[in-house]
Image: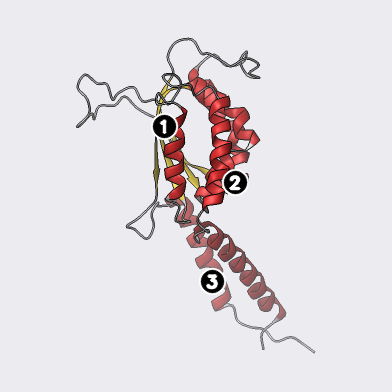
Amino acid sequence: MITNTKQSKLTVGAILLATWATIAWFFYAPATPLSDQEIDAYMVKVQTLLEQSFVMPEGSGLDPRGLEGALADLRAFAERDDGKAVYMVNLMKWREGELSFPAGADLANSISTAEEADIAYNQRLFWTLLANNSHTAYLASVEPNAFNYGTAAGGEADGWGEIGIFRYNSRRDFFDMVTSDAYLSAMYLKVVSMGAIAIAPSQPHGLLFNPVPNVPVLMFFLMTIGYLIYLLAVQKPRTVKE
């Protein structure tokens, strides 16, 4: 006869397992790919974002090709949607010289360096990313680049300041984030901080654990789960007095 104590432990364990399975399914199961109608609607919003964030016009800002080139890249990215998660790899150079803020910028008087502007940008968007099923996967300062293999002579590929990798549960979540009011209000901080930026959408492949989770954190959870299984397996049932 299973005791009430052991039965309650099994119930709690089943609830925790079901909760984990639900969250894992949400994060790893493919979403429905974007429809043509959704892509058209997002492109209208993205155009508004680019026009209002002083990334344009052509020949200035982060994209020297202008609005048409940026929209073409984003539409192609949307049309390749397979419903799976995407990692946006950002390789960034700090803007040199005096920072230029748009009129009415709320943090213009409290930021003096490109690094400070980028920190403010990431802090402001932390909850917006979470609200759109996304998060920062990796963010780090770049050391002086001593490995310019295959790049232009003269060290022109050097000078990168930061690497950022951001995980989006789907391309729909990416577009929901970048077309949100919160992102529109924070975009100027990215433009202020970046002298140049290269963005490469990517998807993991080839390995079961790819990307590899933080090993100490993974070991903690594996050992905790193993210990809970051990407790449930070896506990001797005690009869309940009637």
Return the residue nearer the eye: 56 or 185: 56
Q: Quadrant of the C terminus?
A: bottom right
Query: In the rendering, at what x and y percent does residue 239 appear?
Result: 70, 87
Instruction: Give the side of residue 184 with respect to residue 152, left or right.
Output: right
Q: Which mark is residue 69?
A: 1
Cα gap from disc 3 to disc 2, whole angstroms: 34 Å
Q: Which residue does the numbered mark 3 point to in the structure image?
A: 229
Residue 48 drawn at (x, y percent): 58, 31
Q: How is the image coloured?
A: secondary structure
Mark 1 vs mark 2: in front: 1
> Which residue appears at 37% of the width and 29% of the height?
142
Q: Secondary structure at mark 2?
A: loop
> Residue tagged by mark 2?
132
Name the residue located 63 percent from the left edge and 19 percent from the top edge: 107
Of the two numbered discs 3 and 2 on the same chain, state the one appearing first in sequence.
Answer: 2
Q: Quadrant of the N terminus?
A: bottom right
